[in-house]
Amino acid sequence: MQVRIQSKRADGGATFVVAETSLGVVMGRWHGADPIVGERYGVELDIGDELVWGVTLRASSTAPSIVSSAASSTIVATLVRIDDDVVVVAIADGITLLEASGGAPDLAPGAHVRFEARDITIYDART
């Protein structure tokens, strides 16, 4: 996924960034060399939240998007496939693997799913 770093802050030895994507703004803990504000990076997202079908992960009828607040990011992604407890989704121009428990609904590839993430790590793909 391509992002542009809008801002960064250090907190307890970790760097947190606000990054612009083609779907909206995502916030998370940065993993990699110190990012430069205004620069573009190829990144991978890791969602550390516990997701449960029908509770914190649901089918959605809305278009893919990312809406962030100070506490979390709400992401609507495109479903690629479901493999047992692993949900493969496309977020912007990247692929992300989610771990989800509970009974997955019968969704076809291309359907949209919505979840709220509070524990996002943004990995610089160059490191």
Image: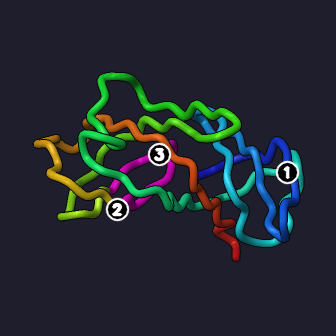
Q: Helix, strand, or loop for circle 2?
A: strand
Residue 125 percent location from the top left of the image: 64, 68
Residue 58 percent location from the top left of the image: 29, 37
Question: Closer to us: mark 2 or mark 3?
Answer: 2
The CA span between labels 2 and 3 is 15 Å
Q: Helix, strand, or loop for circle 1?
A: strand
Mark 1 Cα-neighbour bin, 10 Å: few <14, some 14–19, many ≥20: some
Q: Which residue is mark 2?
A: 99
Q: Which residue is mark 1?
A: 8
Residue at position x 70%, y 37% from top? Answer: 70
Across the whole image, how many numbered discs are drawn on residues? Answer: 3
Q: On the rendered structure, is 50 left or right of 33?
A: left
The CA span between labels 3 and 1 is 22 Å
Q: On the rendered structure, is 104 left or right of 25?
A: left
Taking the magenta stretch, the answer to whether it contains residue 112 is no
Quarter-of-image position of residue 41: bottom right
Highlighted range, magenta: 88-98
The C terminus sits in image quarter = bottom right
Residue 114 percent location from the top left of the image: 38, 36
Type of amino acid at the residue the image marks with label 1: Lys
Type of amino acid at the residue the image marks with label 2: Glu
Q: Helix, strand, or loop for circle 3?
A: strand
Q: Which residue is mark 3?
A: 91
Mark 3 Cα-neighbour bin, 10 Å: few <14, some 14–19, many ≥20: many
